[in-house]
Image (tube, rainbow, N blue to C red):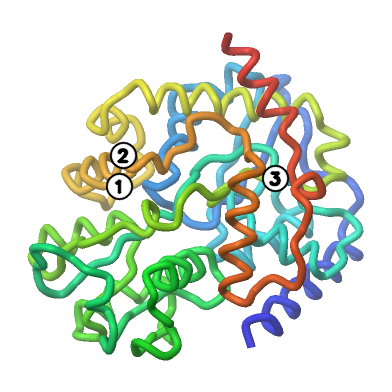
Amino acid sequence: MARSIRKGWIAAALAIVMAAALLASCGKPSDGKTKVTIGEVTRSLFYAPEYVAIAKGFFEAEGLDVELTTTPGGDKTMTALLSNTIDVALVGSETSIYVAQQGADDPVINFAQLTQTDGTFLVARKPIATFDWSSLKGVDFLGQRKGGMPQMAGEFTLKKHGIDPKKDLNLIQNIDFANIPAAFLSGTGEYVQLFEPQASIIEKEGKGHVVASFGVESGHLPYTVFMAKQSYINKHKDAVQSFTNAIHQAQLWVADHSADEIADVILPYFQNTDRTIAVSAIDRYKKQGSYASDPIVDEAEWNNLLDVMSTAGELKERVPYEKLVDTKYAQGAISATK
């Protein structure tokens, strides 16, 4: 079912592309800066370096006028990219693989990595002094959307610990992403897989307890990556390099500053988020190394991603690293900081 849904949105997106204007939206505003439109898959503290790059003026210093939009869901984000509604997508690398599996003539290229682990945590309804993964057998487990990276990383972790998610527990996947925290709070599931800041919010309210990290368990992955169509990159190489330079500057800034300092910079992008919760979430992600230290998508991470997708049954065939990853812009950004 998940594959047919993906096939449908990819086909629809490609049809839009056929009818779209051939010119990309990147252009020169009146102030001389190059405009680049980013479509992020969601608004998340998990993407802190992206907001730092904007708020600290790193994009502007590189001669870019960045417009940030949120296109909820990997399918919507990829459709926006394929139809030239956005120039650059911030989304999981698995979406570029799904497009490639449909035989797209203009592949989507991963050029700058932002996060390098899964961003979800295992939250239990009751406190557990010493958590053992085997205790999940037979429980009601509120998981993430089938075919998405959170669910695939979750299933990969469960299987790593000898748990068959289809047989050994009651896996609940029929709840929309945005409604998963509310469903857990209303009594659905004994355990839930959650992103921050929802995990910290539930913990602060005493209604759940973080007992494990899927990010730690599933290892390094090209989890959230800036990507663009090959045709866009070919036409706007300088802009892509400038973009990657700004992201790397933000990565270095995040690495050198505390969760408190990062929160103060990015909270304007999260006006309804309590500062204490934001600091807690950012600190968790920093401590487990979720924020990539540089923009390079390395081959070991790519192969781990393919293993995770294969384990989840979402991979037709292994897609070569060099087909969908271009590291020269990331390497250029690193060289520029030396």
Nearest to the observer: residue 187 or residue 17: 187
Q: Residues within 10 Å of mark 1 (few under 14, many from 20)?
A: few
Q: Position of residue 8 (x, y in %)?
A: 74, 80
Quadrant location of the C terminus in the rendered image: top right
Q: Position of residue 95 (x, y in %)?
A: 66, 61
Q: Residue furthest top?
A: 338
Q: Amino acid at mark 1?
A: Gln
Q: Residue at x 54, y 69 (%)?
A: 148
Q: Amino acid at mark 3?
A: Asn
Q: Residue at x 42, y 82 (%)?
A: 165
Q: Nearer the viewer, mark 1 or mark 3?
A: 3
Q: Residue at x 69, y 39 (%)?
A: 111
Q: What is the distance, in whole Å, between disc 2 and disc 3 at their CAs?
A: 28 Å
Nearest to the observer: residue 131 or residue 234: 131
Q: Position of residue 247 (x, y in %)?
A: 55, 29
Q: Earlier in the sequence, mark 1 or mark 3?
A: 3
